[in-house]
Image: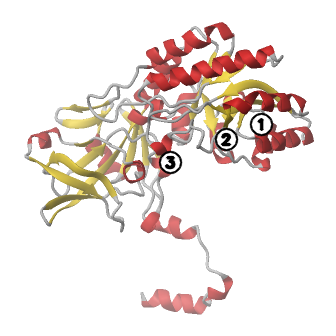
Amino acid sequence: MHHFAYRGGILHAEDIDIPRLADAVGTPFYCYSTATLERHYTVFAGAFAEADCLVCFALKSNSNLSVIKTLGRLGAGMDVVSEGELRRALAAGVPAQRIVFSGVGKTRAEMAFALTQGIFGFNVESEPELRALSEVASSLGRRANIALRVNPDVDARTHHKISTGKAEHKFGIPYTDAPALYRLAASLPGIEAAGVHMHIGSQITDLRPFADAFALMADLVRTLRREGRAISWVNLGGGLGIPYETGSSPPHPNDYGALVLGITRDLGVKLLFEPGRMIAGNAGILVSRVIYAKHSNGKRFLIVDAAMNDLIRPTLYDAYHEIIPVEEALLSRPKAEQDVVGPVCETGDFLAKGRELPLMEEGDLIAIMTAGAYGAVQSSTYNSRLLVPEVLVRGADFCVVRPRPTYDNMLAGERFAPWLETSRSERLRVISEN
């Protein structure tokens, strides 16, 4: 469920009509709904009301400070994969004790910063990382609370670029190697190995891969405890899918919760989760305006002002995003198969290919739905296009929570090499002539 709907024939974000936002901030722009963010977090966390549980929002899905703060106020923890994301979580007021640090390539500097902040723990992905973390923690007179990320070699049945739990993937340690690495962890002075971690992928719409992986994790906890390891928490990652297409119905968090609790109830552990897409995906849309409608070789192209640099998922993952007109009456126009493309100079610059859509024309507004996760965070300034603004709506209020930069902002981020600098008089001459 989300809070984007037609009212009086116009698409609204909660109580604000989208054309009003387009007039205020220009297009394209991202728009996030507070009510949707809050509802999705509350529903997911509520599925584990009977358990000792920490839901850590995955910042890689949406790292806007206002989104982080909105969720942090509800009690969410944060799953971070870089010092930058950690600093964002802290800047948004999330207590360090509710933050876990994931990722295969943590540097020693990042480890040290996280340790000095007092985060909940680290998800460790390899033996070299384990040894490095011990060295860093020991040098600071600390012990790092860790879980080894275990790769269960389970097929998540999702897109190959967002599947992370098979043996050939770069993530985690082999399941069969886990007991030996926990024995090593117990011998290292800077390590407190109290947890177990897994994450098999993203946008998973079938509970069976979860059931297979969770059962393996429960067995591993029992094995480790028989060896004398004091395992007190289990991080089961994220990955629960969401509906990108009307009519699709991924598992409900309550069904997911029942599965987890059925497998882990007898373990007596604290449960951690790292949902990102499930909370933020349907809480955001990308609003764009039609620049031209072009006919070429029997095809119709709808050229819009959003592009692959603003939302790369369609070309990167072959991802489907529903596209609807902001004005409901346009739905009654004749429909035709069209490619929705942007201004970037790449054949891969598309938001939809061969999509049956109403015949929209120059100036019409469209909404690219389910764009709240892995949208703005993956955007770039390719073709020297400005990053698009992000807007947060709450009821009848809205705020531009990341403004659109200016071209001066963009140029100010770079500098000429000294040997390319012109004299002051030459610069003044060029300015006067232009």
Q: Which residue is mark 3?
A: 377
User: Along the line of sight, which residue is nearer the eye, 81 or 250?
Assistant: 250
What's the residue type where badge 1 is placed?
Gln
Label whose residue precedes the other's in the sequence (2 or 1): 2
Q: Which residue is mark 2?
A: 86
SS at mark 1 in the image: helix
- Does residue 47 appear in this view? no
**Where residue 105 sits in the image (x, y, percent)?**
69, 48
**Where residue 3 sits in the image (x, y, percent)?**
33, 29
On the image, which quarter does residue 391 sit in?
Answer: top left
SS at mark 2 in the image: helix
In percent of the image, x 57 and y 26: which residue is there? 73
User: Along the line of sight, which residue is nearer the eye, 207 or 351?
Assistant: 207
Q: CA distance from mark 3 to mark 1?
A: 24 Å
Compared with residue 225, is residue 386 higher up or lower down, i.e. above or below? below
In percent of the image, x 75 and y 46: which residue is there? 110
In percent of the image, x 63 and y 41: which residue is there? 171
In this view, the mark in front (3 or 1): 3
Q: Is residue 422 left or right of residue 333?
A: right
Q: CA distance from mark 2 to mark 1?
A: 10 Å
What's the residue type where badge 2 is placed?
Leu
Label whose residue precedes the other's in the sequence (3 or 1): 1
User: Along the line of sight, which residue is nearer the eye, 43 or 408?
Assistant: 43
**Where residue 375 sits in the image (x, y, percent)?**
44, 46
Q: Is residue 319 left or right of residue 146?
A: left
Q: Which residue is mark 1?
A: 117
Q: Are marks 2 and 1 in contact (CB under 8 Å)?
A: yes
Compared with residue 21, is residue 338 higher up or lower down, i.e. above or below? below
